[in-house]
Amino acid sequence: MQNETRKILESVQNGSISVDEALVRLKTQPFDDLGYAKVDFHREVRQGVPEVIYGAGKTPEQIVGIMGDMRKNGQNQILITRLSREAADVVLKSHPITYHEQAEIGYYGSIPAPDGIGTVVVATGGTSDIPVAQEAALTAEFFGNRVVRLFDVGVAGLHRLLAYREEIMSASVIIAIAGMEGALASVIGGLVDCPVIAVPTSVGYGASFGGLSALLSMLNSCASGVSVVNIDNGFGAGYLANRINHMEAKK
Amino acid sequence: MQNETRKILESVQNGSISVDEALVRLKTQPFDDLGYAKVDFHREVRQGVPEVIYGAGKTPEQIVGIMGDMRKNGQNQILITRLSREAADVVLKSHPITYHEQAEIGYYGSIPAPDGIGTVVVATGGTSDIPVAQEAALTAEFFGNRVVRLFDVGVAGLHRLLAYREEIMSASVIIAIAGMEGALASVIGGLVDCPVIAVPTSVGYGASFGGLSALLSMLNSCASGVSVVNIDNGFGAGYLANRINHMEAKK
Amino acid sequence: MQNETRKILESVQNGSISVDEALVRLKTQPFDDLGYAKVDFHREVRQGVPEVIYGAGKTPEQIVGIMGDMRKNGQNQILITRLSREAADVVLKSHPITYHEQAEIGYYGSIPAPDGIGTVVVATGGTSDIPVAQEAALTAEFFGNRVVRLFDVGVAGLHRLLAYREEIMSASVIIAIAGMEGALASVIGGLVDCPVIAVPTSVGYGASFGGLSALLSMLNSCASGVSVVNIDNGFGAGYLANRINHMEAKK
Amino acid sequence: MQNETRKILESVQNGSISVDEALVRLKTQPFDDLGYAKVDFHREVRQGVPEVIYGAGKTPEQIVGIMGDMRKNGQNQILITRLSREAADVVLKSHPITYHEQAEIGYYGSIPAPDGIGTVVVATGGTSDIPVAQEAALTAEFFGNRVVRLFDVGVAGLHRLLAYREEIMSASVIIAIAGMEGALASVIGGLVDCPVIAVPTSVGYGASFGGLSALLSMLNSCASGVSVVNIDNGFGAGYLANRINHMEAKK
Amino acid sequence: MQNETRKILESVQNGSISVDEALVRLKTQPFDDLGYAKVDFHREVRQGVPEVIYGAGKTPEQIVGIMGDMRKNGQNQILITRLSREAADVVLKSHPITYHEQAEIGYYGSIPAPDGIGTVVVATGGTSDIPVAQEAALTAEFFGNRVVRLFDVGVAGLHRLLAYREEIMSASVIIAIAGMEGALASVIGGLVDCPVIAVPTSVGYGASFGGLSALLSMLNSCASGVSVVNIDNGFGAGYLANRINHMEAKK
Amino acid sequence: MQNETRKILESVQNGSISVDEALVRLKTQPFDDLGYAKVDFHREVRQGVPEVIYGAGKTPEQIVGIMGDMRKNGQNQILITRLSREAADVVLKSHPITYHEQAEIGYYGSIPAPDGIGTVVVATGGTSDIPVAQEAALTAEFFGNRVVRLFDVGVAGLHRLLAYREEIMSASVIIAIAGMEGALASVIGGLVDCPVIAVPTSVGYGASFGGLSALLSMLNSCASGVSVVNIDNGFGAGYLANRINHMEAKK
Amino acid sequence: MQNETRKILESVQNGSISVDEALVRLKTQPFDDLGYAKVDFHREVRQGVPEVIYGAGKTPEQIVGIMGDMRKNGQNQILITRLSREAADVVLKSHPITYHEQAEIGYYGSIPAPDGIGTVVVATGGTSDIPVAQEAALTAEFFGNRVVRLFDVGVAGLHRLLAYREEIMSASVIIAIAGMEGALASVIGGLVDCPVIAVPTSVGYGASFGGLSALLSMLNSCASGVSVVNIDNGFGAGYLANRINHMEAKK
Amino acid sequence: MQNETRKILESVQNGSISVDEALVRLKTQPFDDLGYAKVDFHREVRQGVPEVIYGAGKTPEQIVGIMGDMRKNGQNQILITRLSREAADVVLKSHPITYHEQAEIGYYGSIPAPDGIGTVVVATGGTSDIPVAQEAALTAEFFGNRVVRLFDVGVAGLHRLLAYREEIMSASVIIAIAGMEGALASVIGGLVDCPVIAVPTSVGYGASFGGLSALLSMLNSCASGVSVVNIDNGFGAGYLANRINHMEAKK
């Protein structure tokens, strides 16, 4: 950021641009204004990955518009989350996306081969948690991570989880996804030495209160090294797992 | 109940008591009215165990009065729960009770030797859950049960729990006591084939919301065979464990 | 568990199996991995009853697959809970199940004759609680218990409950099911000396908040000997009632 | 109200007062402004009973000031609720009040003999609910009602309540006070044909959440004819019982 | 109740009935058992009004069955609440009921002329509260009360309420129905000297949380003489209003 | 108000009207009673703007009726909020309204040109918040305010917001609309010196709990000068913005 | 802001400062870093009023330090809120502040004479709300506003509020402060045409849940033109009232 | 784990140990049982760092005992969190710990020099959040991380945060700590490309509900890459930051 500012100042100093021109440049908007959306082209520079489209609450037409703007600006890999089957069908008329119905994810471009750094384990307590898990797994894969899926390894049958001890022990990051009482995160958290991202799901009924039970359980985990994202937020977990798995450049 | 009614009716039939006398007997109160309390002497008949005094919210003087009434009526074993140190000191001036400070339990009479039927395992997730566990254990012992205490075997160090697999496997009833995320109940519930009574505790902070987190977690246990009592309700768990452990006479 | 380990160790000692073979056996997975589910064949050994399929959140195809795997492995009695009419119709094309619509329960195999041990009383506060009650009753029957149904005996007309005092008094376990204010559990809890399993239901409106009112009420029961399962969790209550009713082998 | 307006208008018409005088009278404030309080002398006219001083949140000095103003204006019966022992001691230096510590009620003047109309029954579930019950009972007595107190008749020992069936059946209004699960209100509501005012109390712990459990329970009562006031609001119940008991003049 | 017992005892005494016959009579069930419902014929004796059918959660067939049983037993006035249009159409095939769609109320028999005792005012804050108000008003009318309806007199335009001061001032009971912030109950409560029954409604959005906002507001009313029933419980309010309005016989 | 009263009194004094006539005038109702609604014609006098019709919970027929009454009384600008497409179609058959589907707003008459006083900035965190924003913006425009729309300027890409610093800095009032974590209000509140009206929206999922998250966040804003309206209450924000923007006449 | 940037750029252009100097100036921190606090001297420029010290959660020593830094930088009017008596005593040893105990406010410098623009009315429902009201009133006065205090005008005695109709009608802004059911805000909101800032207070007990009841009530106000600040946030209301009252310069 | 098992099996195979000996070793407890605590010596092997003592809910004597056991087993660096001043004084009589009062942290041994890998930035919204921040910072330092503290950089004065853009941009992990509305996490999350651990604090009042507001806000962050730990859980954040910062060995 500062380098850019220095260049502008030096251009003013050497007279190659005017003060007014500099003023404009200093406030240039690194985004496109579509009215209903300000598409953020600066995010890739700022955060290493391009902006992702959160599909819920947007009309299919708005999604089509945003994608068009992104593609026009040279973005050739686009992820859309929370994309319903119906919306995907509309989008497909304008943009050649691949759609994964269980995860409600669409993407333009292709999922890259894993870059060989670390492994992200995505574990679920039950079968009903799989849609959230697929959202997490696909997101992590979209950003170049190797993903191992361990579904239905909840604590009611502990030996199922312990059978995969090796996979768990060698992960760089583990995403533990569970509804109901959400105990999976604590049990995994007590076994490993890598960061654990807990994702409560809305799976359950009655006193699960739409995922609140699992959420509170995970926040109060007696195992350290566990942090939590929003209920059903598979995308957020996959995104964060990628950040953690790819952070070494910083050090 | 019906036998008693039949006797009264037969006495009316054979003229040994009058209608008015019968009316009085039919509505006789099997309790004593102290004004501030109606001491229930019928409970032993009805439920096999004498009434227990819940100390919280009663003045020490009221407790002394109720105990006096019970002793006068021949009850020679009395349990008082939620009895603070201060209240116990006042009670001790009138009645020779034994006081257990950690559990906040006092009792008149003595704890009987276990009657040889089954074993109640009382397990806690952490050290801070011990006061609730002692309330549960002492209650169960007061009613004649053998109790095994397993403290600090929470799921953050699963091997600590698994090391006691034998004790757990051979229990008649298990009381699983935990605060924070309360995962202990689910993990134990998945290992055993006996009834598990889960007791959430108010141990924790922040999003444990005074035990709500553990409570919800336990209610949503993915392991079957688990039921739940109120937060910190060690007494209730011990009382119910006794009922379950001693129920065979019924069958 | 230990016996099995001893056998493996002795086989290593006497050279009948190699170290590598022993390693494999020690970690052999007593479950089948279908990808979307890990079917737990060890549960029958561990907990006396086979794994039950929780239908909610699973696609009919997944249920069909799990059942196929179970049947292939010799399980000839399978219970499926929370099975909608629509899902049942799909399952019926592959497996000959009996479907009980009100309880949303399907089962493969047949309900056995009661084994003569104790009686489980299933009582409801009102007519609207019957679906939950049927789920509880059928579950208990599926595991071999004699069940007595007492529907619509809520506390607004106490004489209706008291008329069945005999049935209530002679039960081994009582399942008290009620929505709204859930007072049924406390009233029954005060009358009997057997364990009472309280099931709050989501019956009600307004400040019943989806069963929260009945849940809190039951957790705070002033009658001892009452424990609680999740809102609408008829299956859990029936399962636990079976455990309590059949626990004597332990003692 | 209209009569008073008519009189003012007639006085204007016949010239006995001027327009300006009439304007003043039409807007005369039937209250006294002490700065920190506007003492409402109109309430007795409007609602049949004088304003009551709610002591909580007022300094003793403010209470002394309000009482002084009331006495100066001829009010010779004053009720002060939520008056702590400490505040009462300060008030006593200026005004000769009678103080009832358990109920935290003070009053100036004397409690009148009951006026012979109906009976208000004040029933509690347990001993710990007595302070709230005394607040209700004293309030009702302060306004001239006959009160019958039935303490500790909770549903865990139903026969204690049924023993007082006669008192309950012949009441004009019943105030049912209970903490924990608050089932007393429903059970009484199902037995009687008079209005039942339910008062949830904060008695309990854990999942009673400061009275929330009893409050929800009472709001969801399956018995009709029950309405609810705020948690621990003994005064409100006593006040309303008086209104109901003395309403016949209207008809 | 006691008279009936006395008669039975006297019959035993004079030999007109046997002990066994007496036993049966003493435990005779004053209700009919339809399996899914225990129809309570004792309620009219006990509470002055016949049992009402709460339609929600019952199948139309169950309602038809209960009504048939009631009619067979001579009940010629039956009220059914929470009866959907669809259910009403089914019921109409078996029983000639009058159906009021806005209130979701059906009744067999006819609404009697008011009996001349007192007036029940039913006031609402807004137009959207009218369905609840109609449920309350029809219930009160069904039990013989004169009802005055004041709809849309919420506090945002206080003069609309004050314009009806006369109606309000001369009521025996007022039912104040409001959603959103529920201030209507407090404002009316401050104006009158009769009992006020507050009914919070689920009208509103966002932070009204399904009526919670109005419920809490009404429970915390700074005006005394106000009590509260469940959210949207028009029936309960109308039923209680009838009890209050017709209570004088007791005194 | 007082002037009108004076006039009436003077008319009584000079005999031009009778006392009875004066009484009637003093209680004249400045509203029309349609039964289901009391249309408030006094509001324009009292609050400067005519009554607005809140469409939710009203039948289209009721809306048509209220509008007819308003138009008959000379109101030529009518705003209807929360008007669904279906209801609008019904209304259109009777009244020529303009309908804005995204905002669910209909209006009779036309939106006036801005009156040149100040500017209301309506900013949203995301694209999904736009319907609420349009409700706010149209409401403000309907009352004569100039509105600037800034959509999708949430804090995840702060530069998008900062790019519009000029618009924000020169606003008279800012309406900050956001769901999820609602941080937009705090960030804007920290940048400006004009009043900020925060509108939490129900946009989000999981732990957003229908807007509760954004609501609490905005109420706890660490930036001063921010106040909050109900979740999704775009109308309320637009209405209040108008009041603030047009308040100078008072000073 | 832009002007300052232009000046820096022109200085670079004309060579009066170097690029490095410009870089430093462009990122100069308009705050002082005390380690535990970053004192914001830019706020006066940005928001027209100096930073205020929120005393809660700060040690008296930290407050002394921050004040010292402010005074050193020439700020001669400093407001400290939530300052306990004890903390004030410590602060007084270093800085000559005026302390208002009821409002828990301290200030350095003096409260200015009102600047003649508009009037802020601060109204409370009861006497117990006065501390919050004083915080609001003193804050508004500290920033130069004329304040009228109307205490104890709650809706239980509506005539007390209506008696001050004139004061209310002529206000520029009204701050409506109430606990319990918080109806005051709605009633005032329906009477006036100026912005109403509602402040819920934690006054109350039981189901007031620490101010939640009043908060929800105010958020759901059926009167438009009302917005809400945090529970007990008198400062926030006074601060916002000042902003609204002094906003005309913008237009 | 498997290697150890292999060695035991090979010893059995080659006869160097007996089957019984092997059985014992396979179930050897890698923990010490103090009765009230099971000290976990296996954790260092399993998770790379020694067990930490959570001081809350433990008596000082229990802490002394656990530390003694740890030191006896050769652990020469021990961290104790949530250690009150009073408890620390007791512990100090037995063990030479260093105590940090603001963070309520004690440690035996010394804080190591940072190991040169990455930087953990600990940022707070306000001064009141510092105790939680110190707990996080000291924990991270105890495990060998370089920590940069940025206190009081909340979003109400955004320039204070932006002034430290360089520190923020070059962090490996950022711990964002804030109470009230918790917006800091979202704003930081939108600026950086490293993992952000959000810690809600209980700082605030009223509708902050003990940290719930900040918790929900952070869980709903519109910025990706943010995860959340329990309210006030500085230790958990510091512990997780260490795991993330030191995870590269895995890859």
Image: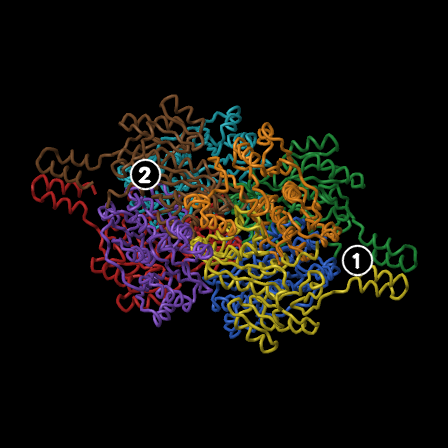
Chain colours: A green, B red, C cyan, D purple, E brown, F orange, G yellow, H blue
Q: Secondary structure at mark 2?
A: loop
Picture quarter containing residue G237? bottom right
Q: Is C173 positioned to the left or the right of B166 in the image?
A: left
Q: Nearer the viewer, residue F81 or D184?
A: F81
Q: Secondary structure at mark 1?
A: helix
Name the mark nearer the viewer: 1 or 2.
1
Q: Is H33 positioned to the left or the right of F251 in the image?
A: left
- At a point 74% along the width and 62% down the height, the residue shown is H163
- Residue hosting label 2: C118
Tell me the number on the disc at residue F138: none
Q: Nearer the viewer, residue B29 or F215?
A: F215
Q: Position of residue E137 (x, y in %)?
A: 39, 36
- Residue hosting label 1: G2
In the image, is residue G178 above or below residue C102?
Answer: below
Q: Residues within 10 Å of mark 2 (few under 14, many from 20)?
A: many
Q: Nearer the viewer, residue A234 or B48?
A: A234
Q: Are marks 1 and 2 in contact (CB under 8 Å)?
A: no
Q: Chain of mark 2?
A: C
